Image: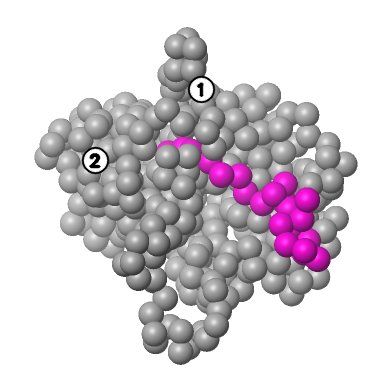
């Protein structure tokens, strides 16, 4: 079977809700990533055989196949198709898996995996709440209700359940959140994001223009006392908005090819996709699946956690990566070395290839070999991807 290689990776800097990227239509935002990947890889636009794009809230401006709309908003020719997928927060990580599987099968040679989410323009939850409010029903079917009676699936409940199950204190979570900002600040000031971020022009309310190239969610004046003083999300809980991922606008993507694709493009790969795992788990605690999925991935890959040089575990809530560390016995100094979604933002469907872009650049900067990425997903699922830098 052919191998899958990543030859280009790029992302936008994150924008806060109502912030610097709020003026960008999500299709145009994603189109800028597609154009950047083609430019960075040196590919001819018509060499791209498909665009697979993750997006969670596929309604409003993100409806009607956002992947195809992004292609039509980009410099790619009309001959390039596009398809949109939803594996909740892991949508663009799943896009990467689908792209890798396509080129490994030999049915395609050059595929873009990407993701986008404008959480300002298409708010979280809109794709389920809007139909329900207008009499078009609810996603929870009678059979689901019979299996999970009187349960409202909630990531917030799941995050608190994670903290309780793994013996994590509020101080543990607050300190993790503080360190996420500190790592993001150091990475930004050290120029570690420079090569992965696509600068975007924005227009302010007064009509003046600026370039957006720094993640807007980073709190450069962060203090541990400030984080500890944020109000709890749930009464008697342990998590606050400061120890949860930030609502974010953003897009990201990677170009994936096989050996024929490498030859046709005439480029050297950034990395090889070494292993891919998907796994489901308890949909009530919901966010726990990355823990057993990581163990399964390592076992199937014939590796141990110590064989992995860097880890990217999505910071949906601080309880997820801290529980992951506790369960895997991983080295904390290798985890989310440039900060995570608590500081940088979590643009839902755009986060999978965003994390992969950061992971690949961090491996290069640190001259490391293996990286592992995983993230919790609504419905109690997880993807795990192991890559080898080349």
Q: Residue at x 62, y 58 (%)?
A: 307
- In magenta segment, residue 283: no
Quarter residue 134 falls in: bottom left
Q: Residue furthest right?
A: 225
Q: Is residue 8 left or right of residue 76?
A: right
Quick check: 235 above or below 116?
below
Quarter residue 32 falls in: top left
- Front one among 294 and 221: 221
Residue behind mark 1? 212
- In magenta segment, residue 244: yes
Q: Residue furthest bottom?
A: 146
Q: Is residue 376 left or right of residue 75?
A: right
> Which SS class for mark 1?
strand
Q: Residue at x 27, y 45 (%)?
A: 67
> For mark 1, does the 10 Å Cα neighbourhood hold few (<14), some (14 to 19), or many (20 or more) residues?
many
Residue behind mark 2? 69
Q: Residue furthest front?
A: 134
- Point out the stretch of residues depicted in magenta: 231-251
Q: Residue at x 39, y 65 (%)?
A: 132
Q: Is residue 125 left or right of residue 317?
A: left
Distance in Å between CA atoms under marks 1 and 2: 23 Å
> Which SS class for mark 2?
helix
Quarter in which the N terminus is drawn: bottom left
Residue 225 spot, x, y in % from top left: 87, 41
């Amino acid at each position: 079977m052919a191998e899958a290689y990543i030859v280009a990776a790029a992302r936008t800097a994150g924008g806060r809700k109502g912030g610097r990227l709020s003026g960008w239509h999500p299709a145009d935002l994603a189109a800028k990533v597609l154009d950047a990947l083609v430019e960075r890889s040196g590919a001819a636009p018509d060499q791209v055989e498909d665009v697979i794009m993750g997006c969670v809230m596929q309604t409003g401006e993100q409806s009607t196949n956002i992947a195809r709309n992004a292609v039509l908003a980009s410099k790619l020719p009309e001959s390039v198709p596009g398809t949109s997928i939803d594996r909740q927060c892991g949508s663009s990580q799943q896009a990467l898996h689908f792209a890798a599987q396509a080129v490994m099968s030999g049915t395609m040679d050059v595929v873009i995996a990407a993701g986008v989410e404008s959480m300002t323009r298409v708010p979280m939850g809109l794709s389920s709440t809007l139909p329900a409010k207008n009499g078009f029903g609810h996603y929870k079917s009678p059979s689901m209700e019979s299996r999970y009676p009187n349960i409202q699936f909630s990531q917030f409940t799941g995050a608190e359940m994670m903290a309780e199950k793994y013996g994590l204190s509020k101080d543990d979570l607050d300190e993790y959140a503080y360190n996420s900002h500190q790592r993001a600040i150091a990475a930004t000031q050290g120029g570690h994001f420079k090569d992965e971020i696509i600068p975007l022009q924005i227009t302010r309310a007064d009509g003046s223009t600026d370039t957006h190239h720094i993640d807007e969610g980073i709190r450069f004046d962060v203090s541990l006392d400030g984080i500890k003083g944020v109000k709890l999300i749930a009464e008697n809980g342990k998590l606050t908005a400061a120890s949860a991922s930030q609502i974010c606008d953003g897009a990201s993507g990677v170009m994936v090819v096989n050996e024929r694709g490498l030859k046709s493009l005439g480029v050297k790969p950034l990395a090889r996709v070494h292993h891919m795992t998907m796994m489901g788990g308890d949909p009530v605690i919901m966010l726990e699946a990355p823990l057993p999925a990581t163990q399964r991935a390592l076992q199937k890959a014939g590796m141990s956690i110590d064989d992995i040089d860097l880890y990217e575990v999505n910071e949906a809530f601080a309880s997820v990566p801290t529980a992951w560390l506790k369960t895997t016995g991983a080295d904390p100094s290798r985890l989310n070395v440039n900060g995570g979604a608590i500081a940088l933002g979590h643009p839902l469907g755009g986060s999978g290839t965003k994390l992969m872009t950061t992971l690949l650049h961090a491996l290069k900067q640190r001259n490391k070999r293996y990286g592992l990425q995983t993230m919790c997903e609504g419905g109690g699922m997880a993807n795990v991807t192991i890559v080898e830098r080349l």
